[in-house]
Image: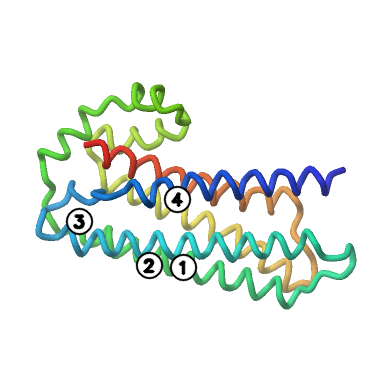
Amino acid sequence: MEKRMFKLTLFSAIIAVSIVYLHGFWAARDPYDPFARKNNSEIGSLITDSAVELLQSASEAFQFMNEIEVVEPNGLISGAALHQVDLAIAKVEDALKIFNEVIAFGSQVGSDEGRIGKLKAFNYERYTRENGLSQETMSLVAAYLGKGNVLGFYQCHTGNLKKLLHILNMIKKDLSDGKLSENKVLGSLLQQYNSTMMFGNYASLVFYRL
């Protein structure tokens, strides 16, 4: 029963993450305007590259989760599982490295005060209610964007990536020791991917509406 419930949780999380993230990916046509116009293209390209790395990491992590769900109780293929976790780690590391470049760029260039003003004036609560979004997640986004603190938002995103790395490295250590992490650790990995992607997705939806 426990394993079946875990499978259901896994399946639901995969669907939720995929829908939420892809929605944000296609909706985010203009997420870089708060920075000086001449830098938009370069910063935008970096953000897109980081998002691709994160999505690829999630794909590797989900393959790992599927691997451990279908294996026999005492027949974990630790080599294959460890390889998938290593790939997931590498992709998150790449996403984090790229986003640190975004923050460095953003710290050096000026902001478009007109767009910053629109971020501050945006009605986050009403938009959340009208579109059936998570109030909890949008509140986290609004805490930064509602104050015009785009760099703070980006720094929070890098913090989420670091949390992902921490959990993945915990799982890697367990696999290297020849054991599988507890369900609560595996579940926290799915939750962290979900929350990280939703955080970015909701911000992209806001930028798209400005």
For residue 120, above or below residue 201: above
Task: Give the mark, 4 or 1, whose residue is nearer the N terminus.
Answer: 4
Q: Are marks 4 and 2 in contact (CB under 8 Å)?
A: no
Q: Give the amino acid at mark 3.
A: Ser
The alpha-carbon separation of the residues under discs 4 and 3 comes to 28 Å
Neighbours of disc 4 within 10 Å: few (<14), some (14-19), many (20+): some
Task: Give the mark, 4 or 2, whose residue is nearer the N terminus.
Answer: 4
Q: Disc 3 marks which residue? A: 107
Q: Are marks 1 and 2 in contact (CB under 8 Å)?
A: yes
For residue 2, above or below residue 71: above
Neighbours of disc 3 within 10 Å: few (<14), some (14-19), many (20+): few
Comparing 107 with 86, the one in front is 86
Q: Disc 1 marks which residue? A: 93
Q: Nearer the viewer, mark 4 or mark 2?
A: 4
Q: Quadrant of residue 86?
A: bottom right
Q: Disc 2 marks which residue? A: 97
Q: Disc 4 marks which residue? A: 22
Q: Residue furthest bottom?
A: 79
Q: Quadrant of residue 62?
A: bottom right
Q: Are marks 4 and 1 in contact (CB under 8 Å)?
A: no
The alpha-carbon separation of the residues under discs 1 and 2 comes to 6 Å
Q: Are marks 3 and 2 in contact (CB under 8 Å)?
A: no
Q: Give the amino acid at mark 2.
A: Lys
Task: Give the mark, 3 or 2, whose residue is nearer the N terminus.
Answer: 2
Query: In the picture, which quadrant includes the C terminus?
Result: top left
Q: Nearer the viewer, mark 4 or mark 3?
A: 4
